[in-house]
């Protein structure tokens, strides 16, 4: 049986560097997906679930540090940052923000591959099948990306799962409209809030005993939404 190739996402705006990275990773058995800007990179990370992300800090549409922050709001995928800056303060700031490693340009492919293998080993040691979040009758397995309601596996669309995943990783906390819009659609304009309301309504129809009187996925008026760890005894709207 063939071992599935590991998937790496390259978020880098310089075509020459992307080609260099692609060649190096593919030679070593990785499957590679490319993104030339932050918006495309976040979409690819959401929909394709890479095993590793290589993230350039100098992107044309959003600072790489902000991309890292958004990734870390819902994912623990290993992230290696690329930068022309080598100051200690910068490295410490990004490592504290959730980067797994930091490589300064210019760099050799052998060094990057060694760091990638080390990051993947650490991740695999920590990623166990116990990464399950419980919310009332819901069970959300963040590793296998499966959801059970009263021990019955549910069928969710990608966006429905993404919404539930974000709320589950912030269990009991309010997640703002702007954050949800940015993380699910890569937009934060309030003109698009109807997209979010429609998605919430569809998800409630699947997880709530009474979608018109939600007790798990509740609205925080004018702010956002909250997923409770247990069924609330008072109406959520």
Image (cartoon, rainbow, N blue to C red):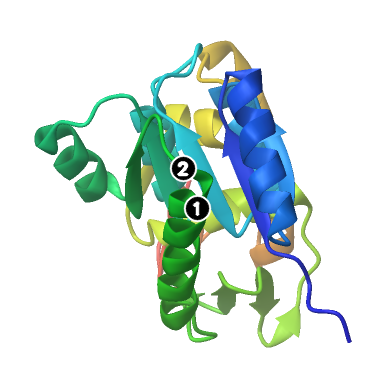
SS label for mark 1: helix
Left or right side of 71 for 1 = right
Q: Is residue 94 above or below residue 96?
A: above
Coordinates of residue 71 in the picture (x, y in percent): 46, 44
Say the numbered circle drawn on residue 110: 1
Coordinates of residue 153 in the picture (x, y in percent): 76, 79
Most foreground residue, 171 or 117: 117
Point 63% across, 44% down: residue: 9
Point 48% across, 86% down: residue: 130
Left or right side of 93 for 58 = right
Q: In the displayed image of the protein, which residue is found farthest to the left?
A: 89
Most foreground residue, 211 or 174: 174
SS label for mark 2: loop
Image marks 1 and 2: residues in contact by CB distance under 8 Å: yes
Most foreground residue, 42 or 54: 54
Coordinates of residue 7 in the picture (x, y in percent): 69, 56
Left or right side of 179 for 143 = right
Say the numbered circle drawn on residue 108: 2
Q: In the displayed image of the protein, which residue is found farthest to the right?
A: 1
Point 65% across, 74% down: residue: 144
Q: Is residue 168 above or below residue 163?
A: below
Coordinates of residue 171 in the picture (x, y in percent): 38, 62
Point 46% across, 74% down: residue: 121
């Amino acid at each position: 049986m063939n071992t599935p190739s590991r998937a790496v996402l390259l978020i880098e705006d310089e075509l020459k560097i992307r080609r260099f990275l692609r060649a190096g990773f593919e030679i070593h058995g990785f499957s590679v997906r490319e993104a030339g800007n932050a918006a495309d990179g976040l979409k690819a990370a959401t929909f394709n679930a890479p095993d590793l992300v290589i993230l350039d800090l100098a992107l044309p549409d959003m600072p790489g540090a902000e991309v890292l922050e958004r990734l870390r709001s819902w994912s623990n995928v290993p992230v290696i940052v690329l930068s022309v800056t080598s100051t200690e303060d910068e490295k410490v700031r990004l490592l504290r923000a959730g980067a797994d490693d930091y490589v300064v340009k210019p760099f050799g492919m052998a060094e990057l591959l060694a760091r990638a293998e080390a990051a993947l080993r650490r991740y695999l040691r920590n990623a166990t099948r116990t990464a399950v979040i419980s919310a009332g009758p819901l069970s959300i397995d963040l590793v296998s990306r499966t959801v059970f309601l009263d021990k019955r596996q549910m069928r969710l669309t990608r966006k429905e799962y993404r919404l539930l995943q974000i709320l589950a990783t912030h269990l009991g906390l309010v997640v703002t409209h702007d954050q949800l819009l940015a993380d699910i659609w890569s937009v934060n304009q309030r003109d698009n809030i109807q997209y979010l309301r429609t998605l919430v309504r569809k998800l409630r129809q699947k997880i709530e005993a009474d979608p018109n009187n939600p007790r798990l996925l509740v609205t925080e008026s004018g702010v956002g939404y909250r997923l409770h760890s247990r069924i609330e005894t008072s109406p959520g709207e």
